[in-house]
Image (tube, rainbow, N blue to C red):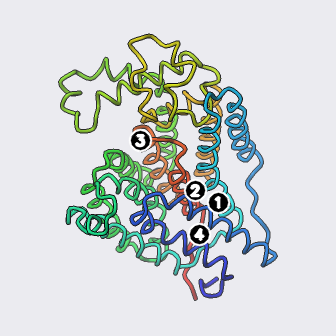
Amino acid sequence: MPFSSRPLLDRAALSLLAILPLAMALANRSAAAILAVAGVLALLARITSGGRLTLPPPAPAAAALTFIAWAAVSLAWSHAPATSLFVAAEAGLPFLGGVLLLISLPRDIPAAFVRWAAIAFAAACVLIVAELAAGLAPREALGLRAQSFIFNRPVMTLLLIFWPLAIQMKRLGWGRWALALGALLIVTVERATSGAAMLGLLLALPAFLVASWSRRTGLLLAGAMLAGCLVIAPFKGVLLERILPPSLIARLESVHAADRIEIWQDFAAIVQRRPLTGAGFGVSAKMAEAPAAAEIPPERGRLLAAGHPHDGFLQIWAELGLVGALLAALNGFFILRAIARLPHDMIAAAAASTIAAAAVVSVFHGAWQGWWIGLLMATAFWCSRETRRES
C-alpha cells in the first residue's frame, strides 16, 4: 500500500520511526519516547481501522513474560525498590511501545518510509561529523551540553539500524545509496568517541559479510556472541586481569581499562554472594548499598558506586542471578530462531545488528536504559518488515 494511502495514524507511527536516527542526534535519549508514542499510534490505527493484531507465537511470548515476571519478583528482595520501579518504568515504556509496533503495523512497509529513514540517517551522520569537526561550537553557542560523548548514543543508534535499513534499500534497487550510507556510518563511528560503537562495527561488518555468504554461519556467529558474552560475564574481570599484561592495561588508560576491569570484578563479587537470585532488578545504580556489598572481601567493592557494571550481561547476573541469566539465554534462543525464519538477505542484517548490540552491551553503561530498549525494538521492527515498490 502506498504511504499516502495508509491511515493517518499508521503514517504518523512510521514517520516517528523514520526520523529516529536524526532525533537521537539532536536529543540523545529520545528513542524511548519515540517508541512509546509510535506504539500507541500504531495500536490506535488498528483499533480505528478494525484491523487485527499480529500476535507473537506463544513460546517466545511466554519466555519474554517469564523474564519480566522474574524481574518483578526480584523487587521483593531489592534494597532500593523505588530505584527498581523507576528503572522498570524507564525500560518498560519503550519495550511496550515496540511490542505494539510489531503487533499493530502491517508487515509491508512503503518505499517512502524507507526513503525518509535513509535521509534522516544521512542527516544524523552529517550533523554528528559536522558538530565534532566544529568542536561542538554550535552547542556551546546555544548553551547546550558540549562534550563529545553526547554522540555515543546516536552513533550506536546508527550502528544497529544501518544493517536492516541497508537491506530494505537494496530491495528497492537503491544498493548504491545503501553503500553510501555505509561509508557515512564508518566515517561517523571513526570520528566519534564511542569505543563501544567502534567495537560493534569491527565485529558487525565481517559478520554481515559472512552471513551474506552463509546464513547458517551468520546465525552461529550471532549465537556464539550472545552465549559467549553471557557466560563469560561473571568471570571477565578476573580473566582479563590475568591475561592482559599491566603495560597494555596502562596503554588503554584512555578507555579506563583498569577501572573497567575492577568494576567487572566488583560486580562479579556480588554475583558470588547472590548467585541464584541476584540483588534485585534495576539496583545497579545503588549496588554499593546492597546487603551483599557488605559481605564481599575488603579488597573488592570500591567501584560498586560507579552506578553500573559497564556490562549489560554482567548486570543481568548481578541483579537477577542465575535464574535471570538462564531466562535471558532462553529469550536469546527465541530471538535467534526468529532471525532464522527471516528472508535470507535480512538474516545477514539481523545477525550483524545482534552482534553489534552484544558487543555494545558487553562494555557500555546500563542494560535497561530506555533509549537502548527503544533502539532494540526499533531494530527488531526494521528486521521484521518487507519493503515493496510503490505503484
Residue indicated by mark 1: 97
Q: Is residue 285 left or right of residue 300?
A: right
Element on which disc 1 rests:
helix
What's the residue type where badge 3 is placed?
Answer: Phe
Residue indicated by mark 3: 364
Front-lying residue, 136 or 221 = 136
Q: CA distance from mark 3 to mark 1?
A: 23 Å
Q: In the figure, 261 relative to 50: above or below?
A: above
Element on which disc 2 rests:
helix
Q: CA distance from mark 2 to mark 1?
A: 8 Å
What's the residue type where badge 1 is placed?
Answer: Gly
Residue at screen point 58% across, 73% down: 14
What's the residue type where badge 2 is placed?
Answer: Met
Q: CA distance from mark 2 to mark 3?
A: 18 Å
Q: CA distance from mark 1 to mark 4?
A: 20 Å
Report if the CB atoms under discs 2 and 4 are less than 8 Å apart: no
Point out the image quarter for the N terminus: bottom right
Q: Residues within 10 Å of mark 2 (few under 14, many from 20)?
A: many
**Which label's residue is closer to the chain start, 1 or 4?**
1
Which mark, residue 377? 2
Q: Estimate the x, y position of residue 76 in percent, counting from the top left.
A: 71, 29
What's the residue type where badge 4 is placed?
Answer: Glu
Residue indicated by mark 4: 386
Residue at screen point 68% across, 33% down: 75
Residue at screen point 37% across, 20% down: 239
Q: Residues within 10 Å of mark 3 (few under 14, many from 20)?
A: some
